[in-house]
Image (tube, rainbow, N blue to C red):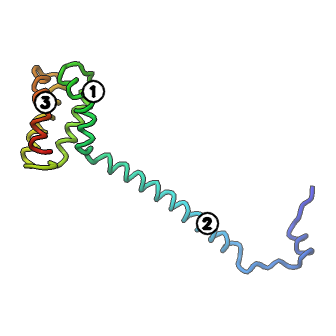
Amino acid sequence: MFRISRLDIQTLFGPVQLEKPISEWCMKIFRLLLAVAAVFVGSGFARFHNETKSAEDPKPIKAVMKEAMKSGLAKKVAGGEATDEEKMQVLNLLIDLVENEAPKGDETEWKMMAGTAMMNAAKVVVGREGAEEALGAAIDCKSCHDKFK
């Protein structure tokens, strides 16, 4: 096996002189790697921060309507045919609805109507008698759309 040592290089090419000591080159490479690592960590943190921020925000009204009302999930819960998981899903969606602002009309009336639906969904989840009928009355589309859409 052929090995080249520093002595062989010096005999072939003369004395090897670096402009800067090796320790300075190592520090520059270390700083470069540290900067690249900081960029990757920073971008990962920013992505994580955006995900957690969006998880705290309530779903928009349009998404709540699509998932709870148009899909028929809320009527299924009001009819007493839903599983416990579906009941919790409707409750979470109605909580998001309450946390949104009224698209049109009186904000207080919006909170009262959406809050009533949310409270009735919570009663369904805990199993109170008559809660399904109350939820069915609270999720009447026309009463809300006339005032807020």
The residue nearer to you, when weighing 18 against 51, is: 51
Asked whether the residues under the numbered discs 1 and 3 touch, taking CB atoms below 8 Å apart as contact, a structural biologist would say no
Estimate the x, y position of residue 144 in percent, counting from the top left.
Answer: 11, 39
Residue occupied by mark 2: 30
Distance from disc 1 to disc 3, alpha carbons, whole Å, reads 14 Å
Q: Residue at x 41, y 51 (%)?
A: 48
The answer to which image quadrant residue 146 occupies is top left
112 lies left or right of 21: left
25 lies left or right of 143: right
The answer to whether 67 is drawn above or below residue 29 in the figure is above
Which labelled disc corresponds to residue 86? 1
Estimate the x, y position of residue 76 in percent, counting from the top left.
Answer: 22, 23
Give the secondary structure at mark 3: helix
The answer to whether 89 is drawn above or below residue 24 in the figure is above
The answer to whether 115 is drawn above or below residue 105 in the figure is above
Distance from disc 1 to disc 2, alpha carbons, whole Å, reads 54 Å
N-terminal-most mark, 1 or 2: 2
Q: In the rendered structure, which amino acid carries the disc numbered 1?
A: Glu
The answer to which image quadrant residue 82 occupies is top left
Residue occupied by mark 3: 120
Distance from disc 2 to disc 3, alpha carbons, whole Å, reads 61 Å
N-terminal-most mark, 2 or 3: 2
The answer to which image quadrant residue 147 occupies is top left
Q: Residue at x 14, y 48 (%)?
A: 102
Front tag of 1 and 2 = 1
Tell me if mark 1 has few (under 14), some (14-19) or many (20+) residues whose alpha carbon lies within 10 angstroms of its own: some
Q: In the rendered structure, which amino acid carries the disc numbered 2?
A: Phe
The answer to whether 44 is drawn above or below residue 31 in the figure is above
Tell me if mark 2 has few (under 14), some (14-19) or many (20+) residues whose alpha carbon lies within 10 angstroms of its own: few
